Image: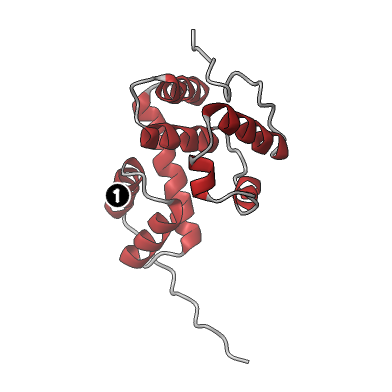
Amino acid sequence: MTTTPSKTQTHLSQEERKQVIRLIIKLISLSKDTTDIKQAVSEKYNLSRRSVERYITSARREMVKQVNLPPEVHRAESLYFYLSVINDPNSIQRDRIRARERIDRLLDIDLSSITQARREFDRTAQEIHDLSDEEFQDYYNKKLKELGVNPKSSLFNGTYQPS
């Protein structure tokens, strides 16, 4: 049986800790994935991934302090902003899709069931593209029901208007 050598524990100075947190804040602001952040920081500073997780938590707390809003208020404002992007008739499809992804992340929606449902489409992309608006809406509602989402919910039927 082979054992992997454990990493020697790395102790960072106060200045290095601040540097790590600033780096993580920058990476988060660039929309980098947490996995990528963990890998990059752990390699650069010879830290365990668990240590990097603690630095990520500290960086997020620092970002909340900088925003100077309670997290619940910030989440609510973000939700309304992303909903306005979805409902804006001048926004492009890519922005609407990104806004939906951000809402999913914001609401901590488990996307594994949605990913599984994507594999179960009974039509090709071209067939879906060729549907009339009415046929597409019916197909879309059917898929929402399969995911356990109420298609009449104002978030999904395009009638949601933030106050």
Q: Colour scheme used in the picture?
A: secondary structure
Occupied quadrant, residue 141: top right
Q: Is residue 83 left or right of residue 91?
A: right
- In percent of width and height, residue 118 lies at 60, 49
- In percent of width and height, residue 55 lies at 42, 50
Residue at x 58%, y 22% (from the top left corner)? 157
Question: Is label 1 in a helix, a strand or a loop?
Answer: helix
Between 42 and 128, the one lying in front of the other is 128
In the figure, 45 relative to 150: above or below? below
Between 81 and 134, the one lying in front of the other is 134
Q: Amino acid at mark 1?
A: Leu
Q: Is residue 96 left or right of residue 132?
A: left
Q: Residue furthest bottom?
A: 1
Label 1 packing within 10 angstroms: few (<14), some (14-19), many (20+): some
Between 114 and 90, the one lying in front of the other is 90
Occupied quadrant, residue 12: bottom left
Q: Quadrant of the N terminus?
A: bottom right
Can residue 20 be seen at all in this image of the molecule? yes
Q: Which residue is mark 1?
A: 23
Residue at x 47%, y 44% (from the top left corner)? 57
Residue at x 41%, y 64% (from the top left corner)? 47
- In percent of width and height, residue 35 lies at 45, 57
In the figure, 52 relative to 43: above or below? above
Number of numbered discs visible in the structure rendering: 1
- In percent of width and height, residue 98 lies at 42, 37
Q: Is residue 157 left or right of residue 53?
A: right
Can residue 11 be seen at all in this image of the molecule? no
In the figure, 67 relative to 46: above or below? above
